[in-house]
Image: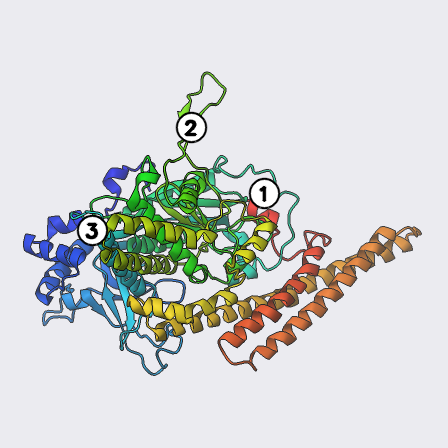
Amino acid sequence: MSEYINVAETFGCDVFNDAVMQARLPKKVYKELKKTMEEGKELTMEIADVIAHEMKEWAIEKGATHYSHWFQPLTGVTAEKHDAFITAPMENGKVLMSFSGKELIKGEPDASSFPSGGLRATFEARGYTAWDCTSPAFVRHDSAGGTLCIPTAFCSYTGEALDQKTPLLRSMEALNVQALRLIRLFGNTTSKKVIPSVGAEQEYFLIDRDKWLQRKDLTYTGRTLFGAMPPKGQEMDDHYLGTIRQRVSAYMKEVNEECWKLGVTAKTQHNEVAPAQHELAPIYAPANIAADQNQIMMRIMKRVATRHGMRCLLHEKPFAGLNGSGKHNNWSLTTDDGINLLEPGRNPHENIQFLLVLTCILKAVDTHADLLRESAADVGNDHRLGGQEAPPAIISVFLGEQLEDVLEQLISTGTATHSIKGRKLETGVKTLPDFMKDATDRNRTSPFAFTGNKFEFRMVGSRDSISECNVVLNTITAEVFKEACDRLEAAEDFQMGVHNLIKEYAIQHQRIVFNGNGYAAEWEAEAQRRGLPNLKSMVDAIPALTTEKAVKLFETFGVFTKAELESRAEIQYDLYAKAINIEARTMIDIATKQIIPAVIKYTTVLAQSINTVKAAGVNEVSVQTDLLKKTSKLLKNTNQAMARLAKLLEKIKELPEGEARARYCRDKIVPAMAALRQPVDELEMIVDKEMWPMPSYGDLIFEV
């Protein structure tokens, strides 16, 4: 790779973006495609054929030999099937390179092998991928050569959504319809569309690949199942925003270049709190494009790490005792002509449209806090949420001093008459500039925080798709927008109707607002007093998908059917049980084949040392004897804990698949895993390092 890169020239060079389409497509075809993208107008096959031909020609120029419908099934990762552009050989033995409109618009992967939660029987194999023309196609270069990747939705033969993208697109449309109704009431006749915009900050760990290969727990599960804390962890806070190591800098440089080529606006990079932890954040994009680009980014991060002799860990909690990794989902509502509905302006108390939007969102989050919590539910996230490093599992909204004051005025008097202003920040140093600070501080302990002109949903796990949480945010907001518009469109006095509605929502849903320390034990008690749900584990959160309230919400806006929701709940239970089962079996495998043999070897050396010293006429062997006794006791505890875990695992087979297995794993297997880990981690602190069978935490996080 070149040492320097011209970002302006390189950005989007491998993307079939608007500029490429405008340059290559006939004007009529380009105009029709834009109508499809902006208005949902159906493409004719004649138009699709022209687009497909030009897309193929462009892709071949970029070195592509294959094309693939690139989709996001409910597996947690993306999927793709590659087809070459070549057609059947002609009489002269030559082949043509072709790509039709039908091949562009529709694909047919086998749907039976992807999670469906009972929507599809195994023998019912047909599934369809459908081109999402609003998310640009791109050419990905890797060891397989060049592949034209076409972002698509994935559904079953009978139309049920089997992916993350289909419900996201449905939710975006539902929100657009209701948001347009709302802004029309305030006199906006020019905006044609309201788009949820998202910026997803991505946290991750980098470790040496050779050390990763020596850890079965990392290779099988993505996290360490054993590991004692080193003498130094993150106590000194010296890694956060610290100088980036050269090896990591080289990695980040290449990640940026790869992202930029594919149109991913990678912007902010820095060291995170824990040693070996980092963050990469993009600029905002429409929610479906942001979700696609986050998947692209994660793939690039993993692939580039391998080229640099490292491994990128995206698990939410790869190391116990260290800061976990999240994916902060920054969400706002923007019109096609650039108006941000969450921009409070200089005087929020006078911005009636903003206050209505704000209080609608408060009502939405309060009403569906359980759904929002479920949207961040993940096996790995159970280790992160509620710790002193991430938001608590209790959903609340941080508004900041300025908006909280406006809200209190509305609640107490019915009218807001002033807004707290930002004051000058005086540093006390004459050579440093004084400047106006923001009217509101930030709160890193809040799961849903207003941060100037957007909401930051901080609960999402680092390896999760951001689609699920944005489906929920879009749909619950659409629901309250619809209710507000229904009432205001029927109001005799619009101004009074808006005033009353803002006050009503503020009063009825003030319980969801919390600007304090979400880590404090007092907050849990206070949240219980307020009646806010506290869903501490993924298994606790999953039932939110199938409540009567949730089914009504999603069916009203055509985002999910009841069957689709039930299938997703079954998939979640199944994923949880399988993940815990794999982790538990991995622990037993490591303990049996690596740890116990290593400890036996160590105790044998200790015993031989005692006998040798005594044979030399020295009777003072208390240190060796104490070590031998302590190690032997811990070895016995390890073996007993392992046997208990193995016995519990055998009982899983007796339980029906789904919720029963998931709850059993949470209640029985997870505590048994913790019981096995405890003596092993103690043994790591005793056994000779040369005999310990795997790299320690210190080896992994400080030697990158």
Q: Position of residue 568 (x, y in %)?
A: 40, 70
Badge 3 element:
helix
Name the residue nearer the viewer: 174 or 151: 174
Residue at the disc numbered 1? 234
Total marks shown come to 3
Q: Is residue 409 left or right of residue 167?
A: right
Label disc, if present, on residue 184 of the rendered structure: 3
Indicate which disc, 3 or 2, sits on the residue closer to the N terminus.
3
| Quadrant (top left, top right, bottom left, bottom right) of the N terminus | top left
Q: Position of residue 667 (x, y in %)?
A: 60, 69
Image point (60%, 79%), residue name: 651
Mark 1 vs mark 2, foreground winner is 2
| Residue situated furthest top in the rendering | 430
- Type of residue at label 1? Gln
Name the residue nearer the viewer: 178 or 326: 178
Does residue 324 lie above or below 161 as drawn? above
Q: Position of residue 659 (x, y in %)?
A: 50, 74
